[in-house]
Image (cartoon, rainbow, N blue to C red):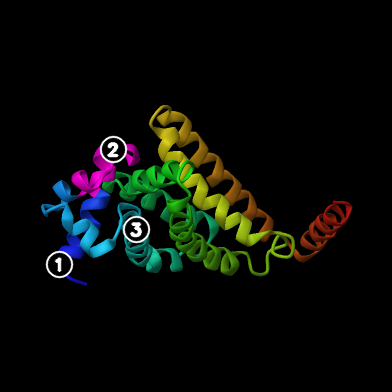
């Protein structure tokens, strides 16, 4: 990738962090990148195409950055600990805010909805792989909608970025509740074989009733 294209991608992310999705234009992106705004159209065609490319490449880079840490999680509580660290670092870097802004823009502009969803799917896929590994052998493994759970986790961390801005204590409480839930699942996994079979039977009956 040329230096100019990389500067434009980085400038797009910086412009969204500074101005929000509503304030992004070829001019603000070029100013953040330190290049002539005509280069936006020369290299990417449209501002929307540049937004899509920045979202895709920026998210892929951050997923690669965290992949080893996520893969090292040995329990759901470990995964949440990594999630807390991820949330704090990405919030400080402005990356969670960037995704939140892209999501906000996608509500009114279908041209950036698909690339934003594709970028989020990179996180979902990474988290889903970890959840499948951690839930293997658990009484919940047969009934858990792991893809749906991975999406819920991804959405929660983006939503917490917005919620944290108005209620930091509430966001901390939400993370603590997730930690308690993970602890409960670990306690269930530590039950003896008789108790686990009884729990599995109850779970299966509940699922059949639904």
Q: Pick the residue in front: 184 or 83.
A: 83
23 sits to left or right of 102: left
Q: Is 180 situated above or below 185?
A: above
**In which quarter of the view is residue 35 placed?**
bottom left
- Judged from the image, the secondary structure of the residue bearing numbered disc 3 is helix
Q: Pick the residue in front: 133 or 13.
A: 13
Residue 139, position in %: x, y? Answer: 73, 62
Q: Is 132 situated above or below 48?
A: below
Question: Mark 1 packing: few (<14 Cα in 10 Å), some, or many (20+)?
Answer: few
* Residue at the disc numbered 3: 49
Could you tell me which residue is drawn at 57 percent across and 69 percent down?
A: 133
Could you tell me which residue is drawn at 22 percent across and 72 percent down?
A: 1
* Residue at the disc numbered 1: 3
* Residue at the disc numbered 2: 23
In three-dimensional space, the C-alpha distance between marks 2 and 1, rounded to whole angstroms, equals 25 Å
Residue 203, position in %: x, y? Answer: 80, 56
């Amino acid at each position: 990738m040329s230096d100019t294209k990389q500067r434009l991608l980085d400038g797009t992310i910086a412009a969204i962090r500074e101005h929000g999705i509503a304030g992004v234009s070829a001019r603000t992106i070029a100013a953040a990148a330190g290049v002539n705004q005509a280069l936006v159209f020369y290299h990417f065609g449209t501002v929307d195409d540049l937004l899509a490319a920045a979202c895709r490449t920026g998210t892929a880079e951050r997923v690669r950055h965290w992949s080893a840490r996520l893969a090292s999680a040995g329990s759901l509580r470990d995964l949440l600990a990594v999630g807390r660290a991820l949330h704090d670092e990405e919030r400080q870097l402005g990356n969670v805010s960037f995704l939140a802004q892209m999501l906000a823009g996608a509500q009114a502009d279908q041209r950036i909805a698909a690339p934003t969803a594709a970028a989020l799917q990179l996180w979902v896929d990474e988290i889903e792989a970890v959840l499948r590994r951690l839930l293997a052998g658990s009484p919940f493994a047969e009934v858990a909608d792991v893809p749906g759970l991975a999406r819920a986790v991804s959405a929660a961390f983006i939503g917490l970025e917005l919620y944290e801005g108005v209620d930091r204590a509430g966001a901390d409480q939400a993370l603590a509740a997730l930690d308690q839930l993970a602890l409960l699942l670990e306690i269930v996994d530590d039950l003896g074989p008789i108790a686990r079979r009884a729990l599995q039977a109850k779970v299966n009956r509940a699922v059949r009733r639904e």
